[in-house]
Image (spheres, helix red, strand yellow):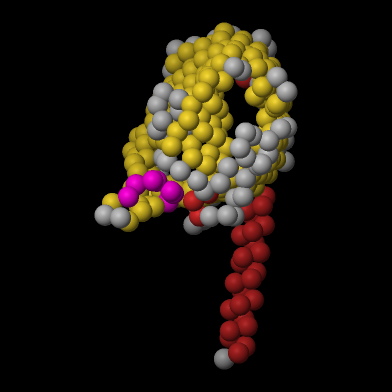
Amino acid sequence: MIKIILKKLSAALFLSTVVLFNLCAELNIIPMAEFGALQLKDDNYLFSPSGTLLFKYQKDEEDSSNMPDVIAASLSYGQDIISKSLEDFEEKQFHSMDVFGKIGFGRNTFLLKVTGRGAHPFESYKNYEGLLFYNRELIKNDSMTLAVGGGLAATDTGIVIGGIDIFVVPLPMVYFAYKNQFIKTEMEWTGLPMINLMLFPENMFRICLIAALAGFDLPVDLQWDCALSCYPVKKEPFNELVSVSAGVASNVKKLRINTENSLKYQYYCVYGELSITALTIRGGYSFGGKQILRTKGDKFSKDYDGGFYATISGMYKF
């Protein structure tokens, strides 16, 4: 009996090793790093370093095994560091952590995301948000993709029914993409909606628009970015790798101080950007917006005068 168990265990370990070897042979590992700086006042700055490690596996079309078609996962960690402490608060360093997982079988996809924010991220469950979604592709061809589904969000919603705090809410999920020689668009609603639109995607000069919601405090939480981009290299495949852009945007930066207090900066800006895919540099000036402090259900808002801002990001694919 013991010999049979050992044989089965050895066979399972051997098969697992083969599967892992095949999986690793198809695995892409992509480390990414970003550093941002935003001027809050004349003598106060917000620095935002972050790093992400992305893993992605894509099964070959000829592979007839029962392995998933797609497996992707990422782990991110970042900080927001204020050079001088905030008024009425001693906190100067804020943490952010993100875990993402995706697995796809044919037309079916499962998504999991866990996010943590705060100056003291392990202080309370209120600093965390979890999303679990399922979607199914209804349409997929060369020009169009449509997937619909739904899932659950576990977070501090602030909703109270009958004296009971509601922490889990159902949410829809929709993904739509369409492209031709004049337009390329992508719309995703996973928790909060986002749309990405590009006009004349095959030309040297293109118009790019990105819009998304960072929350439901409108119009402050509406983020958008509109840019005119030039792709100067005509030779394939480098024609999609290098771009120079100029644009205007509305950005939102959120800082969670503790379970009762949070701070948000919303600002408009103009910028210039140089991207060579693996390295992107952006610099500009934020010319005003709002500084919003939430504390124990109260909201205090004042004008944000603005200042310079810059970001630099890089990635490498193994």
**4 to 196, vertically: above or below:** below
Percent coordinates x, y for residue 191 in the rendering:
41, 40
| For residue 315, side relative to residue 106 (left or right) | right
Please state the horizontal and vertical placement of residue 92, each as a whole percent of the image: 68, 39
Query: In what quadrant of the picture does the C terminus appear?
Result: top right
* Image location of residue 142, percent across then percent down: 43, 27
Pick the residue in front: 126 or 142. 126
Q: Nearer the viewer, residue 281 or 180?
A: 281
Q: Report the residue that reaches farthest toward the bottom.
A: 1
Whether residue 252 is visible, yes or no, is no
Q: Main secondary structure of the magenta part?
A: strand
Q: Is residue 1 above or below residue 286?
A: below
Span highlighted in magenta in the image = 154-160
- In which quadrant of the rendered image does the N terminus lie? bottom right
Q: Is residue 2 left or right of residue 213?
A: right
Q: Nearer the viewer, residue 86 or 169?
A: 86
Is 284 placed above or below 103 here? Answer: above
Q: Position of residue 233 (x, y in %)?
A: 67, 12
Residue under the point 49% across and 51% down? 126
Residue visible at 66% across and 22% down in the picture: 41
Q: Per the image, is 24 magenta?
A: no
Q: Residue furthest left?
A: 162
- Give me the residue at 47% from left, 13% from top: 199
Residue 305 seen in render: yes
Residue at x-position 42% and y-position 51%? 154
